[in-house]
Structures are given as C-alpha cells and as structure tokens.
Image (spheres, helix red, strand yellow):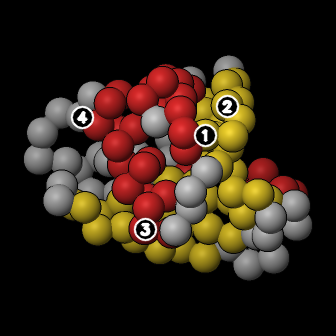
Amino acid sequence: MKIKRAFLDTEDGQIFYRIGGEGEPLVLLPMTPRSSDEFKEFMAILAPKYRLIAMDLMGLGDSDKPPREYSISDYAKTVILLLDQLGIEKCSILGSLTGGYIAGEVAVSYSDRLNKLILCN
C-alpha cells in the first residue's frame, strides 16, 4: 500500500502529513521533537485495515514553523482542520507522549469527532 505525502494549508503555515490505507480513519500523532517519520513502518503494517493519517506537528518535521508559540489546544485545532480538509467526520487517534496530550485535548474539546483514543509511551 502506497503512503502519500501531502500538505494542509493553514493561516499559520503548512502542515505536512502522510496518508494511506483503507478502512477506519486512524490519526497518528508523534512525540516531540519527532515527526510522522516515527510511524512509517507502523503505517505499512496497518494500511490494509486502516486509513492512516500521520501528521508533523507545526514547527516539527516538514511542517512550517508557526508565527507564535503553539499550545496543546492549538495543535488539537490543527488535527480538526486536517480532518475537515479530508472530509473525515469521526476517527480514532493514537498519540505518543506529546501526541497523547494533543489526542486528549481532541477527546475533551471535540468528543463528537472521536471514536477511540489510544495513548502510548
């Protein structure tokens, strides 16, 4: 299964993400200072069962550096922007360390958009 690379335009710059696979959407949020690169092998394994979206957080990886300091709430909003851009109503989210904090914020602030929350590390 081919994993594609793409960008989402936001008012604070571009967010890089990887997307591929079939099935239930699963967003992968990395620990800082890592990037979506952290999930490349994982995505290859899960792509037959899930539509995987791994994003680089603003200021990390191939995403632009934001013009201001980002809060966990700001990062959570970028997750929702990406879901909106991709036409995804609900998804599951896996968050690793900092990604887990962001996933938790999505769960609290946008609970209607979440199927499952997976926290690791």
Q: Residue at x 24, y 34 (%)?
A: 70
Q: Residues within 10 Å of mark 1 (few under 14, many from 20)?
A: some
In the picture, the quarter occupied by the N terminus is bottom right
Figure check: 76 above or below 46: above
Type of amino acid at the residue the image marks with label 4: Tyr
Reading the image, the residue beneath label 4 is 70
Give coordinates of residue 105: x percent, y percent.
Answer: 45, 26
As drawn, the label of residue 117 is: 2
Q: Earlier in the sequence, mark 3 or mark 4?
A: 4
Q: CA distance from mark 2 to mark 3?
A: 21 Å
- Residue 7 visible in the displayed image: yes
Q: Are marks 2 and 1 in contact (CB under 8 Å)?
A: yes
Q: Residue at x 69, y 70 (%)?
A: 20
SS of the residue under disc 1: strand
Q: Earlier in the sequence, mark 2 or mark 3?
A: 3
Type of amino acid at the residue the image marks with label 2: Leu
Q: Foreground mark, 2 or 1?
A: 1
Q: Earlier in the sequence, mark 2 or mark 4?
A: 4
Reading the image, the residue beneath label 3 is 85
Reading the image, the residue beneath label 1 is 114
Q: Residue at x 35, y 43 (%)?
A: 77
Q: CA distance from mark 1 to mark 3?
A: 16 Å
SS of the residue under disc 4: loop
Q: Residues within 10 Å of mark 3 (few under 14, many from 20)?
A: few
Give coordinates of residue 106: x percent, y percent.
Answer: 48, 33
Give coordinates of residue 67: x percent, y percent.
Answer: 11, 47
